[in-house]
Image (tube, helix red, strand yellow):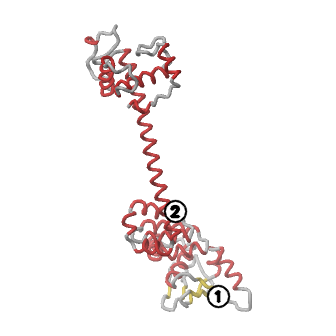
Amino acid sequence: MGVKTEFNSYTLWYEAGKDYALPPADVVIRTSDGQTVLAHSSILASTSPVLERKIDRASRGWNSVCTIRISGAPSDAVIAFLHLLYFTRISTVEATMIEDILEKHGMQLLALSHAYQIGWLKKQCEIIIATELTPDRVIDVLKIAKLCDAPRLYQQCMKIIVKEFEEVQRSDGWQFLRRYDPTLELEILEFLEDIDQRKRRWKQQRAAQDAYQHLNIAIDCLEHIFTEGCSETGPRNVDLSRRNKGPCTWFGTCQGLQLLFHHFSMCEKRSAPGSCIHCKRMWQLLQLHASICDHPESCKVPLCNDSRFKMKMQREGNQTRHGDCL
């Protein structure tokens, strides 16, 4: 099966083999620059509902050959567009041939495939154009993506703008946009602001998760210290000298809590609210543990089973900021 195109006279025709035969061309296509291309109505109508309607309207009359216009693109892009429509009916066409056409006329083919409702071609154009995006031309591509309702390509353009915004601002497309299309400029700036807000929210959520994780570890270490004993601090009935000297699971946290508790036990200001920041953190940890402990009767953490301490917590409305414990 051979494929031949006479580009000099802008006549599109095919020599098909025994398995595929085409009747004489019955459609005359006129392009925006005045060129003429011959094609087959059966091929065009089967690939595009828009072309089918145009051919149907143009065929109503005495002439056996109807004439339609395909505007909005130069004649070489229209011929490439027709090539691709014919290629869908010829299974032996190599994929590299189609890719070469898409790479050469991607933007024009995107506009034509959108106008004539050819979904598979529009999707392929979006993929090819997205792989060739650069900061200096991304604004122009973004405009085409909006006009052609190409969401995948639009998202790819926005990713490039977010990633390379400083370089995009130096492009001619951005300067033109600022002068003549303030609506699209505002849309881009709002998108960038939304991305920044999402990043800030993500960082805040991540910080909150880290804070809760550290608090959980601190509470576990507190119970570990006063139940099993650690390197320097433990319950009275545990001999720390006979204890295994190997580091515990959260050695750094345990060591910090032991130092904090030693300070708390010796500090003269611990009874005065807010006078010592270290004692304040220890009080808050003890309050947090007492509020969530599910076995206060047997718990060995100080003040956990102290009814007066819990009554004080209730009077204060349990308004302690847990995040200040860290």
- Tell me the residue that label 1 is attached to: 67
Labels 2 & 1 near each other (Cβ < 8 A) = no
- Height in image: 247 above or below 44? above
Tell me where residue 55 appears, x and y as whole percent. 67, 82
Residue kind at label 2, given as amino acid type = Arg
Secondary structure found at label 2: helix
Q: Residue furthest right?
A: 61
Residue kind at label 1, given as amino acid type = Thr
Tell me where residue 257 appears, x and y as whole percent. 33, 24
Q: Nearer the viewer, residue 175 or 97?
A: 175
Q: Residue at x 61, y 85 (%)?
A: 69
Measure the C-alpha gap from mark 2 to mark 1.
35 Å
Q: Quadrant of the C terminus?
A: top left
- The numbered disc on residue 52 is none
Tell me where residue 54 appears, x and y as whole percent. 67, 81
Q: Residue at x 38, y 62 (%)?
A: 164
- Tell me the residue that label 2 is attached to: 152
Mark 2 vs mark 1, foreground winner is: 2
Drawn side of residue 159 relative to residue 72, left or right: left
Q: Residue at x 67, y 77 (%)?
A: 52
Q: Residue at x 51, y 84 (%)?
A: 74
Dividing the picture into quadrants, the one containing residue 274 is: top left
- Height in image: 23 above or below 259? below
Tell me where residue 119 appears, x and y as whole percent. 58, 68
Q: Residues within 10 Å of mark 1 (few under 14, many from 20)?
A: some
- Of the numbered discs 2 and 1, the one sitting upstream in the chain is 1
Q: Residues within 10 Å of mark 2 (few under 14, many from 20)?
A: few
